[in-house]
Amino acid sequence: MNIHPEKNLSTEKYITASCLISHSIVYLNDKAVFENKADSVSAFLDNAYQHFDLKYPKFYKMDNLSKLGVLGSDIMLKENFIPGKYQPAETGIVLMNASASLDTDIKYYKTVSEIASPALFVYTLPNIVIGEICIRNNFKGENAFFVFKNFDGKFMARYVNNLFDNGVIEACICGWLELIEEKYKLVLLLVEKEKTNQSIVFTEDNINKIYGIDNG
Amino acid sequence: MSDLKKQIIVQLNLKDLKPEDIGDDQPLFVEGLGLDSIDALELIVLLQQEYKIKLSNADDGPKVFQSVRTMAQYIKAHQAQKE
């Protein structure tokens, strides 16, 4: 195996921005920035989309998991990420959840008895949300979607650090993106090599602290 | 054609559009409404669900789904055949 020693030196990475969405509240960098008690998760996501004026008509065609991911990444990146700072292939995405795409799988299955919905079928894989975020932002870097019973900050820290340390990526959007029926929780982190005024070190402890901001 | 436009908006989740935003002869794909291949499949579903029309020949697709007017003409022609 051809190992480049200089690429295996682990250095600190930093969480330069975060977004958490759960229980009808959007938190950006630990502060609540939007709250909306909608009747359903669909209505909440559409209301948040309008509130943040995201201007992406394709949003309405997505399933709820992709809507949640695109919404969270857009809110997080809007003021914390300079487009063009990295090459498209240098920004990776690593996500995990517990229910994969089950929410949409069930909705799709219900249509099969009459006419199977092509628009639902295309969202019956959890990693489709990664594709949607990549298309929206022109990211072409390494990506992965893991399905775990619970959020695993230790695994996330190790996996993402490994991508950085092997020179695969220069920036990463990572986190937890769970949605099943009316229950949902998104925790996204922007991880970079350079410190900023508000950044904290990308460690398991700090990941878990951000994950628990909503006490959920 | 207004009803058909409403059905297209609902079927394709074009929530930011109103029926009057869609021109009768406006191309539905690429430079027009910007629909994609999945939308084309959803339009076929719409014909089946709302009008009980099965698009039997895939080669007819580009002609039928050129615009709202060509869709409406196709639906009318099929309904006339049934009567």
Image (spheres, coloured by chain):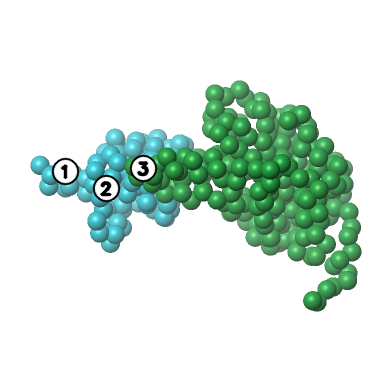
Residue A113, which numbered label?
A: 3
Q: Amino acid at mark 1?
A: Gln
The residue that mark 2 highlights is B71
Query: Foreground: A201 or B63?
Result: A201
Q: Is residue A84 visible?
A: no
Q: Amino acid at mark 3?
A: Ser
Compared across the picture, whether A23 is left or right of A128 comes to right
Residue A145 location in percent, x, y? 65, 52
The answer to whether tags 2 and 3 share a subunit is no
CB of mark 2 within 8 Å of CB of mark 3?
no
Q: Amino acid at mark 2?
A: Met
- Kindly indicate which chain is depicted in green in the rendered structure: A
Compared across the picture, whether A156 is left or right of A200 comes to left
Residue A88 picture quarter: bottom right
| Foreground: disc 2 or disc 3 | 3
- Which chain is mark 2 on? B
Residue A76 location in percent, x, y? 71, 42
- Kindly indicate which chain is depicted in cyan in the rendered structure: B
